Image (cartoon, rainbow, N blue to C red):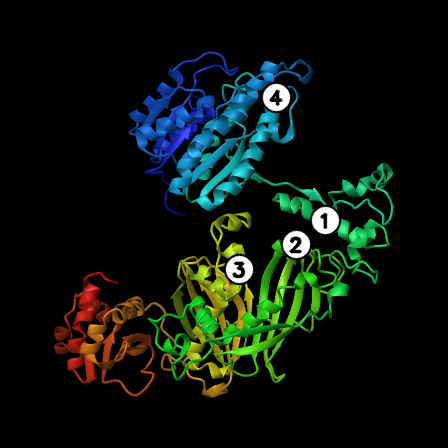
């Protein structure tokens, strides 16, 4: 069980809060720390009359229990006044619960213009006006939670409530759109359809039913939707009697009634009516307007290219007709796309290295970032960049010309280098669709791109696997011999692990290497894809992970790289930390990457094959880092201080190796290389021997870093042992003083 959910510091506006559901919402939010604006016009359920009593009584009850609340007596048609009450009293508005409502029940034939207009004005227009007034303040503070109140009548219809049900379903549409427009501002909007006893239902339901449908059996659900922990948006929830459920739209597989070269007639609809209405077969669950139209277009393309009846088109692989339109795997498989030349220079190589996290604070950075360095080289994963250009014309392939590129997900990637990449090259890319696999819920499109140098020598092999959502079920094979398979990692604890925080600008930087998909830079475009912010490119995370493997097992020697295979599982957000867990099996390094902050796996089934076999060394002195060492965080961050302290580096002018022990055994080795530009890294010195070697326990090292233990005292008491130039540790004292001052 987690901690109690609180609303301290949040300001909530509840309309129609003078009784029933609204009152329970206000009481609960206030009891959990929210400051509440209790709005109620004080009229009857038909919307007639006005009184301050209802709102005042709720405010007084909240205040008597130590809560914070103010009344508001305006109509929801004066939405700006309600929101202004919150701003005047509490300075902000975080939660809006549109609850106010009235009834004017009439059979459809007896509904007057007044009955219709008043219901729309209070329920639909009132919710619009209140929300519109709060919207700019929520956008500015990048936070907001909005709840619309629909009803079973709105969702399903009800006799005598045509006006009411129309307004209530209108609120669902309003909420659906606001959920999309608000996502990039952290404004979430949901709809509830509550069933509870209130002044609107007090003489409609029998007493025993009303007892089971108390308003306080709905309030917790609504409060949770208003809490920052709740990440739902665009949802529809029915709730009552302590029960809650989410609704979604369901659609039959439908039928394409068109026949090739024939007019569309009423009789064709009649003849396909059973299939149009069949929920017993395959169903879909559209969640957007794009989803709504996609199946229609796919069905149209399939039907227009198929000589058989629409009912048989689901198992057709495309035939051999002359029409290349639509999704037609049989025409795409084996198709060789146009060759494309790709030329790059050292500038492109450096830009890519920066895009996948190489930093001047890291050891060996010059070999990746400075073109005049004698060891300048290209990160192996740069090999995906030339191939990416070769895949840009996927929609030119016969059989793939009408696919929706917005429904393509990058599923897997394989890269193999036949020889290390040069600092600058001209490559010719030859892409080919080698296979398409039917995964029922979608199609796997497997494309190989071979890249050749000016001499016609094969340099780079890429296999790109994309998943085309909704394109499955075409009767194709379920696997492919051409696919480079992912491999499950060993079941033991990782042999090594490495963490690295990405920059908040990582995606903006990586895209300059050629992937300009707005999903990775434009918040509004990301919101359309269902993401709260732009996400990191999968191939960027791929580059980070491969660097970790090369650093850990190849000492950043790019000539040892042979190939890499990954599956992309979940996205990484710029600014999050990528943790790569690694297992060595001979010359194959299995790895899995995850987001350290959430534990979500972003790369799975992955491996890097290296040249060198059993002689490969673990960069951490052949010892996997011991999980749980307290010193790891301090040592990992020490590099930042060292790299920004040239005077300290110049003063020490030496290399110090720290052997960190746990339970009497060396658990980790770290090197303070305080020569040249200075660096702190895990493992033994990369060249030569240390000028001083310090052996200290994990606890005592943290005590030294925190200032709880003085180096001199530790040495005299035997808590640290030093070999070599003992005075170097004395020169290192300013670094530990930086720790004490809280610079880490």
Residue 493 seen by the camera: no
Asked whether disc 2 touches disc 1, contact meaning CB atoms under 8 Å apart, the reply is: yes
Camera-side residue: 23 or 46? 46
Q: Earlier in the sequence, mark 4 or mark 1?
A: 4
Camera-side residue: 239 or 609? 609
Eye-nearest disc, 2 or 3? 3
Eye-nearest disc, 1 or 3? 3
* Spatial separation of the CA atoms under disc 1 and disc 3: 27 Å
User: What residue sits 19% from the left and 63% below the top?
Assistant: 740
* Spatial separation of the CA atoms under disc 2 and disc 3: 17 Å
Residue on which the image places disc 4? 163
Residue on which the image places disc 2? 404
* Spatial separation of the CA atoms under disc 2 and disc 4: 39 Å
SS label for mark 3: loop
Circle 1 crowding by C-alpha within 10 Å: few under 14, some 14–19, many from 20? some
Q: Is residue 558 above or below residue 100?
A: below
Percent across and percent down for residue 629 are 31, 69
Q: Earlier in the sequence, mark 2 or mark 4?
A: 4
* Spatial separation of the CA atoms under disc 4 and disc 3: 48 Å
User: What residue sits 42% from the left and 36% below the top?
Assistant: 136
Residue on which the image places disc 1? 297
User: What residue sits 34% from the left and 23% below the top?
Assistant: 59
């Amino acid at each position: 069980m987690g901690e109690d959910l609180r609303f301290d510091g949040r300001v909530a506006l509840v309309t129609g809060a003078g009784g029933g559901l609204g009152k329970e919402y206000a009481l609960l939010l206030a009891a959990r720390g929210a400051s509440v604006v209790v709005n109620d016009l004080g009229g009857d359920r038909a919307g007639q009359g006005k009184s301050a009593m209802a709102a005042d009584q709720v405010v007084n009850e909240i205040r008597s229990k130590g809560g914070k609340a103010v009344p508001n007596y305006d109509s929801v048609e004066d939405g700006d006044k309600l929101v202004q009450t919150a701003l005047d009293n509490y300075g902000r508005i975080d939660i809006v619960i549109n609850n106010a409502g009235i009834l004017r029940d009439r059979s459809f034939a007896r509904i007057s213009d007044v009955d219709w207009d008043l219901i729309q004005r209070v329920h639909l227009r009132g919710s619009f006006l209140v929300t519109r007034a709060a919207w700019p303040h929520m956008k500015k503070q990048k936070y907001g939670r909005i709840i619309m109140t629909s009803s079973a009548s709105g969702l399903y219809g009800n006799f005598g409530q045509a006006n009411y049900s129309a307004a209530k379903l209108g609120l669902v549409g309003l909420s659906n759109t606001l959920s999309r427009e608000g996502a990039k501002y952290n404004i979430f909007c949901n709809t509830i359809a509550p069933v509870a006893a209130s002044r609107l239902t007090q003489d409609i339901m029998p007493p025993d039913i009303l007892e089971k449908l108390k308003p306080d059996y709905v309030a917790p659900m609504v409060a949770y939707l208003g809490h920052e922990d709740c990440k739902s948006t665009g949802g529809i929830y029915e709730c009552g009697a302590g029960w809650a459920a989410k609704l979604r739209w369901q659609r039959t597989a439908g039928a394409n009634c068109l026949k090739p070269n024939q007019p569309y007639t009423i009789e064709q609809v009649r003849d396909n009516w059973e299939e149009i209405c069949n929920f017993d077969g395959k169903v879909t669950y559209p969640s957007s307007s794009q989803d709504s139209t996609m199946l229609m277009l796919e069905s149209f393309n399939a039907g227009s290219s198929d000589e058989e009846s629409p009912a048989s088109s689901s198992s057709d692989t495309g035939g051999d007709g002359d029409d290349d339109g639509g999704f037609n795997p049989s025409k795409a498989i084996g198709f060789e796309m146009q060759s494309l030349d790709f030329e790059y220079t050292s500038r492109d190589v450096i830009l890519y290295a920066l895009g996948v996290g190489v930093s001047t604070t890291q050891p060996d950075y010059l070999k990746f970032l400075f073109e005049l360095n004698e060891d300048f080289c290209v990160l192996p994963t740069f090999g995906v960049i030339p191939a990416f250009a070769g895949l840009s014309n996927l929609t030119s392939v016969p059989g793939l010309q009408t696919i929706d590129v917005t429904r393509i997900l990058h599923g897997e990637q394989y890269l193999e280098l036949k020889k290390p990449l040069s600092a600058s090259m001209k490559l010719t890319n030859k892409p080919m669709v080698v296979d398409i696999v039917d995964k029922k819920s979608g199609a796997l499109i497997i494309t190989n791109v071979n890249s050749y140098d000016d001499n016609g020598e094969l340099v780079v092999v890429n296999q790109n696997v994309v998943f085309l959502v909704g394109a499955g079920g075409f009767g194709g094979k379920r696997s492919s011999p051409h696919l480079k398979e992912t491999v499950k990692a060993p079941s033991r604890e990782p042999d090594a692990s490495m963490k690295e925080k990405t920059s908040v600008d990582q995606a903006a930087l990586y895209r300059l290497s050629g992937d300009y998909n707005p999903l990775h830079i434009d918040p509004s475009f990301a919101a359309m894809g269902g993401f709260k912010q732009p996400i990191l490119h999968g191939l960027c995370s791929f580059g980070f992970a491969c660097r970790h493997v090369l650093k850990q097992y190849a000492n950043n020697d790019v000539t040892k790289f042979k190939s890499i295979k990954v599956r992309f599982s979940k996205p990484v957000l710029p600014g999050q930390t990528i943790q790569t867990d690694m297992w060595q099996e001979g010359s194959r390094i299995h790895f899995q990457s995850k987001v350290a902050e959430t534990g979500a796996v972003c790369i799975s089934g992955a491996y890097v094959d290296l040249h060198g076999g059993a002689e490969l060394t673990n960069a951490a002195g052949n010892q996997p880092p011991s999980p749980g060492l307290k010193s790891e965080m301090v040592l990992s961050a020490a590099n930042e201080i060292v790299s920004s302290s040239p005077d300290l580096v110049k003063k020490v002018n030496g290399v110090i190796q720290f052997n960190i022990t746990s339970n009497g055994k060396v658990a980790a080795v770290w090197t303070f290389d305080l020569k040249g530009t200075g660096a702190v890294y895990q493992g033994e010195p990369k060249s030569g021997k240390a000028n001083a070697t310090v052996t200290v326990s994990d606890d005592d090292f943290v005590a030294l870093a925190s200032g709880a233990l003085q180096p001199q005292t530790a040495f005299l008491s035997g808590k640290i042992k030093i070999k070599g130039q003992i005075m170097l540790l004395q020169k290192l004292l300013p670094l530990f003083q930086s720790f004490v001052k809280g610079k880490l």
